[in-house]
Image: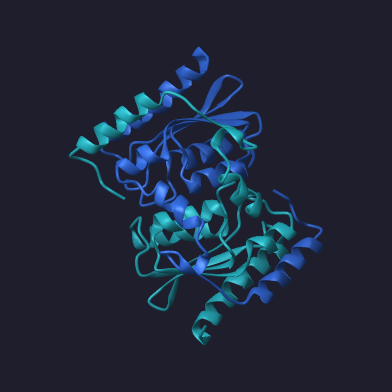
Chain colours: A blue, B cyan
Amino acid sequence: MDRYDQEFMKKAIQLAKENVSSGKGGPFGAIVVKDGKIIAEAMNEVTCCDDPTAHAEMVAIRRACRELKTYQLTGCEIYSSCEPCPMCLGAIYWARPDRVYYAGTRKDAAASGFDDDFIYDEMELPPKDRKIPFINLMRNEAVEVFREWDDSEMKVNY
Amino acid sequence: MDRYDQEFMKKAIQLAKENVSSGKGGPFGAIVVKDGKIIAEAMNEVTCCDDPTAHAEMVAIRRACRELKTYQLTGCEIYSSCEPCPMCLGAIYWARPDRVYYAGTRKDAAASGFDDDFIYDEMELPPKDRKIPFINLMRNEAVEVFREWDDSEMKVNY
């Protein structure tokens, strides 16, 4: 951990803090850094914007991609005030930044009533046994669409 | 599986198919149903919209929430042409629909070059050992923000 990393993490934590004082949303902040510069910053916007996907990391990733006009964050780093939940972790893998720094952990989030840890546990259960049941049907029809994708000359891989 | 479910799933698969023929995005479609009616439908928009978070399920959830003016999908069902990736699974748990139906599986997606299965595997590794390293720093400062959240009278739980 160098001074540089600390300054960026301080900023992410500051955003989380401001979101609590303003009452706007959950206690989470995140920034995206490229070449030593902040290119996107975000706070949790779930309740203020009626969007359950608007976690700080998600909003920061979307803003950074808009800024860079790309769907990949190669060469970027994400600083998040808390360990990413499964949704945000998934988004990070799809965006492919170089690395992620986080401050609070999923256990810290759970201690304040957030479901992160619960969701990590649920993912390991067989789909149909989860608290929200996941039911499989019509697999063959879906596989046909994957074959059309494989054969498509217009596809853009991501 | 009743005829009803099949009709909705056919619609989700049809959206996936159209997205491949148009070349707009990945082979994925999803819809949100409430009281037997479709309230949101979506296709994968990652490459066309420079948004790595724009999977079909994510876009459908966000549209359904905008439609219902809420951040919770209680009483709703999601039909997805493919098993949700970790990002979408996380979003589903935060949105809390009653259940999820899916057609293709994560293995089918992997066979067409998608990272879903890889991300599920990566999540189980210790954060610092992942292909995208997750590095913990300044935890104590983040925990202070959770304490401010716990004590806040303005907070809206979600």
Residue furthest top as drawn:
A3
The image quarter in which residue B117 lies: bottom right
Q: Does any portion of residue A154 appear in the rendered image?
A: yes
Percent of width and height locating residue B65: 39, 59
Q: Residue at x 35, y 59 (%)?
A: B72
The image quarter in which residue B13 lies: bottom right
Q: Residue at x 66, y 71 (%)?
A: A142
Percent of width and height locating residue B66: 39, 57
Residue furthest left as drawn:
B153
Q: Image check: A15 left or right of A61?
A: left
Q: Residue at x 20, y 40 (%)?
A: B154
Determine whether B101 is above or below A95 in the image. Answer: below
Depth check: give the residue in front, B17 or B143: B143
Q: Does any portion of residue A22 appear in the rendered image?
A: no
Percent of width and height locating residue B57: 53, 60
Q: Exactly how many numbered labels are in the figure?
A: 0
Residue furthest bottom as drawn:
B3
Determine whether B36 is above or below B152 in the image. Answer: below
Depth check: give the residue in front, B31 or B116: B116
Percent of width and height locating residue B127: 55, 36
Determine whether A151 is above or below A117 in the image. Answer: below
